[in-house]
Image (tube, rainbow, N blue to C red):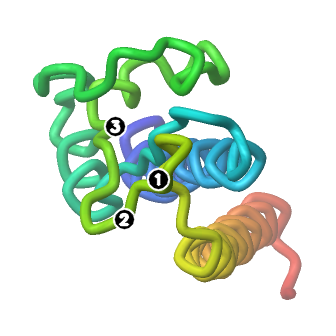
Amino acid sequence: MGGLLDQAFNPLADALRVSGYRQQLLSANIANADTPNYKAVDIPFSKTLQAVQAGDQGGMAMQTNNVRQLAGAPSSVGLAAFVQYQRGSQVGLDGNSVDMNREQASFLQNSVIYQADLTFLTGEIKTLNSVISGTVI
């Protein structure tokens, strides 16, 4: 039974973990929009999720030199290896590379993905609970 539960929940848990960590990074970018020399960071969601599901929690080299940009929950330590500076952002005179329009759009898109994964996981749990208890949803 454990194998079936892992098979049902692990992909969703991985997706929630990656999108949750990405949300932290995007939030930090938005919060630091006026911080001199702050460089916007992100993770490539699909590539990171594939690596996490394959069991590669840190096979990539760290792509930033500021540990404060990578602060997060202890469960996110392996995900920090996938953080990259955002490309294509214009760097302001103060050295800041946060593009608020892009950050807000990315934050909103990532929120929708996170909510969809959470809704799907909740549905899976309800279905399993129904099967275990013998009731119909």
> Nearer the observer, disc 3 or disc 1?
1
Could you say whether the residue bearing mark 3 is in a helix, strand or loop?
A: loop
* 54 vs 98: above or below: above
Q: How many marks?
A: 3
Residue for badge 3: 83
- Amino acid type indicated by mark 3: Val
Q: CB under 8 Å between callouts 1 and 2?
A: yes
Left or right of residue 57: residue 124: right
For the C terminus, the quadrant is bottom right
Q: Residue at x 28, y 25 (%)?
A: 81
**Residue reaching furthest to the bottom:** 137
Could you say whether the residue bearing mark 1 is in a helix, strand or loop?
A: loop
Residue 72 visible in this rendered orientation of the protein: yes
Residue for badge 2: 89
- Amino acid type indicated by mark 1: Ser
Disc 2: CA contacts within 10 A as few (<14), some (14-19) or many (>=20): some
Residue 124 visible in this rendered orientation of the protein: no
Disc 3 and disc 1: Cα gap in Å?
15 Å
The numbered disc on residue 97 is 1
Question: For this rendering, which residue is in front, 97 or 4?
Answer: 97
Disc 3: CA contacts within 10 A as few (<14), some (14-19) or many (>=20): many
